[in-house]
Amino acid sequence: MQDTLAAENLLVERCQQGDTVAFDQLVERHGEWVYNLAYRMVGDRDEAYDMAQEAFVRAFRAIKRFRRGSSFSTWLYRVTTNACLDEIKRRRRRPAPASSLLDADGLSPDPPDPSPQVEDHVASLERREVVRRAIAALPLHHRLPLVLYELQGCSYEEIAAITGANVGTVKSRLNRARLALKEALEPHLELLRGG
Amino acid sequence: MRCDDVIELFSRYRDGELAPADRRAFEAHLETCDRCREGFAALESVLAGVRHLQPEPAPPGLAATVRARLEARTDRPRAVLLRWAMPVAAAVLLVVIAFGVFQVMPERARLAQQPALGTDRYTAADKGPTARPPSKQTEAASERGREARPAVGVITGPVAPSEPPGAGELSTRRAAKDEWAGAGRIAESGALGAPPPSAPLTLAGKPKAAEPTRKYTVREGEPGGAPSYRAPVERPVSPLPPRPAMTPLAPSSAGPAAQGKEPANSEAAAVRSVPGRAAPEEAASDTGLAGRRRGRGPASVTVTAEASKRQLAFGNLTLQVKSDEAVDNAEVLLRAGRDKPEVVLWQGRLEKGTANNLDVQLAPTAPLDALQPERASTQEAARQELVIRGPHLNSQAYYVFAPSGAGSRQVGPMSRAAAKPGHGKEGKRAGATWDEVLQNVASDAGVYVLAPAGFPASQATNLPARADQRAVEKALGEMGYGLRAERGALTIEPAARPAAPPGRAGRSRR
């Protein structure tokens, strides 16, 4: 772990000196996390891809202002979060693309895993889709901590650092988000428990 | 403890945030309250469903795309300058035109009124305190102007500031000299704010004031004629400077270490490619490169790429060429397969700076039937050939190997968490595909995994981030494979004397 942090710090240092190759490696390291956060926030793969790009571009432009000693990943995730929020606000001003409705987990073109039975696979897809839609319907201030905590694996403190809120607020919002999600998914409990 | 209080504590209890006393009270309440117990169970089910959402693998080529955007932004100042130059110029022009119009419009209004006034006398009262009586010269000019043709030259004066010094000054100077002198002076006086001529000048003719950017000249030989319009000359676009002679792309050349190039990371769709060698001569003639290459360099690089059946079925491929600036304006042919080189599925071009990504949209009419033998086997990826013809900027193009035909079954139950820890509780999904593992491992440790077709992933060999071709060949040799160069393409194939597979796992951990 120490080696990882040291290597990352070295990469960050090189990036601050304008080394784009080092930044490529940072993108490779954090690309999946950044992309997943964007995807869970907007629910559209293409937009999430654009958002992830935008987040990294912003990060590169601002990386000289990053202070060493703090966590680069937290800083990057904050940049990503801001990029996501900006994009979501922008989307509110324009109609959602029709494709976003089709770009759901359950309707993804991924081939089915051949190992489970077809029925189980269909149920699994349906579960994912129901949950995904419920998350997407949450208010933004609930959705963000929920995604960060439940899907992105962040701690309270990390979420607080990313969102700029204090830990108590994060806990409160997370609790509210969970209860709201439970309420939204209660009609589908049988489906969820079937998995 | 009331039900409402318990519900508020659901999250904190679940996350172990409750003090022991509160925890005991919470549990005691759940034992006695069916509603809260069911509610808490429902919450657990819901959150289990949330965790069931598996993380999406990062799209291939994210780093390359980000790099391209960053590189594009480095050119931004120039682009911004170009973008703003024309609007700013247009705005300045508009101001100049407006200035000219404001100079002319009062003239027009007053001139329109003059016949009604029935006098050509100009009085100070007509124009207010700032007005001045016309000078004798102006009056004289007015008189001459009445006789002179009401040419468009009259309007040239007010808009003169907007005109280029050449033509505009020329027309003005000429007007002062020849029989247009009166009109020219009227224009100049107008520009000075002097009272307009009392002569009923007409503004008939072309509204030249609205075309200040055009150049008007009075040609020699027609001194008294109307100025002729000379259309702006379109400057031919200067051709690009000749490209430097190409450097041959030799298999034995040094890799990216010598170039200071970082080998690009692999991606899901196309991760198997190797440095090309000398290309067939006809390729050079196809691209018009004959005579521009130095030595016996190649004119094409063949990259063997793979696309899954799913990608082919959807006709949407993202292939990645593992070389920064390897090609420039190169023709790209996507062939159906080694056995069917005559079948071209897609044809496009690679430009410099976008050489890492190839977004291929197969036409609905693409002859996918040619792939039927491969597609018949559901677990095997269809093999294609990606032929790139064209100028190569970097002869030391380095490509990363990845297994061909290595599906998830060959990878085995490798944990994603083992490949890339952290980033969420969902990262422990087993059964990752080879592509995912390859991406994660490569991105995590800067190490690229090398494995030939069908080689067990657990016995794959790592490559250092700056591995050169010698390292590639050595790694292949350790696995009992070698490189074979043929017709511009390199292929991994079993060596004559396979060496014992290394015991080292294909995962590189930090």
Image (cartoon, coloured by chain):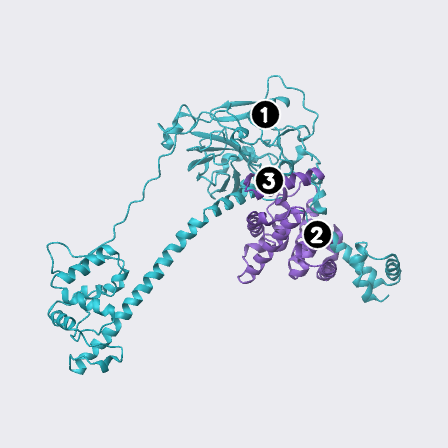
Chain colours: A purple, B cyan
- Residue B466, by quadrant, is top right
Seen from the viewer's position, the closer of residues B121 and B361 is B121
Q: Specify the amino acid type for callout 2.
A: Glu
Disc 1, disc 3: CB below 8 Å?
Answer: no
Mark 3 belongs to which amino acid? Gln
Q: Nearer the viewer, mark 1 or mark 2?
A: 2
Q: Chain of mark 2?
A: A
Mark 1 Cα-neighbour bin, 10 Å: few <14, some 14–19, many ≥20: some
- The residue that mark 1 highlights is B471
Q: Is residue B335 above or below residue B102?
A: above
Find residue B461 and report its horizontal and vertical position in percent. 64, 28
A166 lies above or below B398 = below
* Quadrant of the frame with the N terminus of chain B: bottom right
Q: Are marks 3 and 2 on the same chain?
A: yes
Q: Which residue is mark 3?
A: A25
Question: What chain does mark 3 sit on?
Answer: A
- Which residue: 41% across, 23% down? B296
Specify the quadrant that holds the C terminus of chain B: top right
Alpha carbons under labels 1 and 3: distance apart: 21 Å
Q: Any mark on residue B275, and which? A: none
Which structural element holds mark 2?
A: helix
B36 vs B161, left or right, is: right
A164 or B479: nearer the viewer: A164
Label 3: how many Cα within 10 Å (few below 14, some 14–19, many 20+): many
**Sequence order check: which comes first, mark 3 or mark 2?**
3
Identify which residue is drawn at 56% across, 43% down: B62
